[in-house]
Amino acid sequence: MTHTTAIAATSPSPLVSLRGIGKHYGSLTVLHDIHLDIQAGEFLAITGPSGSGKSTLLGILGLLERPSRGTHLISGVDAWSLSDAEQSRLRGSALGFVFQQFHLLPELTALDNVARPLRLNRRGGDWRAEAHRMLERVGLAHRAGHRPAQLSGGEQQRVAIARALIRRPQLLLADEPTGNLPPAMWGDILELFRELNTDGHTVVVVTHDPLVARRASRNIRMEGGVTERANGPSAE
Ligand code: ADP
Ligand code: MG
């Protein structure tokens, strides 16, 4: 496999390396000079106040946002030297997202939303059974036939989590994945992420949940568009 369909697993480089990344929207600078290495297999938690640039940083990590400056390497390869087609193959095969806005397709049932990445990326396989198992894992098997408009915010969030996990992405990017869920459920979602991580997948989660942050292998705090270690003043 080339790095265009999967991130090279044996590369000596960090899985992701951000060098001097800045992002601005017009005159508004949202990210300042971010330097961040993420090693394969890490479970990284990002915390920080609203507006500090957490979602923008995840968008950059997911190749959804182009940085205004700096270099974004994926296994040592400049992500923005790839063609649009190579980038979208990477997004589709190696990266998984749980967005703050869930981006479920309104015309599809919960089951079909969860199964969609499987059906887009491979032929055959029992996608229906796999999607059903994943819905069970997030406690929503009984909602498989419902459309997003018939589900609560928390249920939609769980569908979005199931959809992101079903392909077992090499790099999972989750933006406040428990934000709409009752605290009683946070542990279950954390457990799903930890299982993926224990199997060697890299997890980056933006969270306000101290439990998630505590169980992560590393914590980063963002403040005003710069990253800091959670328990110290020095930058990454
Ligand atoms: P967080 O996720 O930490 O709350 P965001 O990354 O969503 O922060 O936003 C950081 C800042 O960037 C905010 O001030 C937000 O209003 C601004 N911002 C985010 N996206 C855009 C955009 N597309 N256009 C203009 N400003 C934006
Ligand atoms: Mg955000």
Image (cartoon, rainbow, N blue to C red):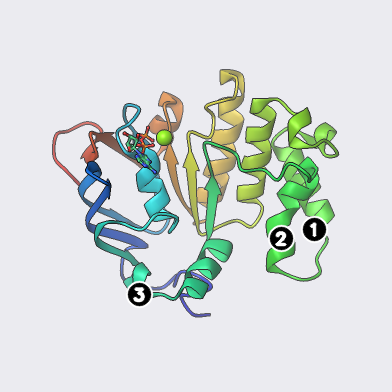
User: Which of the marked residues, 3 or 2, is nearer the chain's N terminus?
Assistant: 3
Q: Name the residue under label 3.
A: 81
Viewer-closest of 153 and 39: 153
- Give yes or no for contact between labels 2 and 1 (Cβ–Cβ under 8 Å): yes
**Residue 235: % across, % down:** 16, 43
Give left or right: position of 88 versus 81: right
Q: Name the residue under label 2.
A: 118
**Residue 161: % across, % down:** 62, 41
Identify which residue is drawn at 61% across, 25% down. 185
Ligand 2 is located in which of the four quadrants?
top left
Q: Name the residue under label 1.
A: 127
Q: How crowded is mark 2: few (under 14 residues within 10 Å), some or many (20 or more)?
A: many
Q: Which amino acid does label 1 sit on?
A: Trp
Q: Residues within 10 Å of mark 3 (few under 14, many from 20)?
A: few
Q: In this view, does 235 lie above or below 63?
A: above
Q: How far apart are marks 3 and 1 (CA)?
A: 34 Å
Q: What residue type is labelled 3?
A: Ser
Q: How crowded is mark 1: few (under 14 residues within 10 Å), some or many (20 or more)?
A: many
Would you say residue 73 is visible in this rendering? yes
Give left or right: position of 86 versus 117: left
The disc placed on residue 211 is none
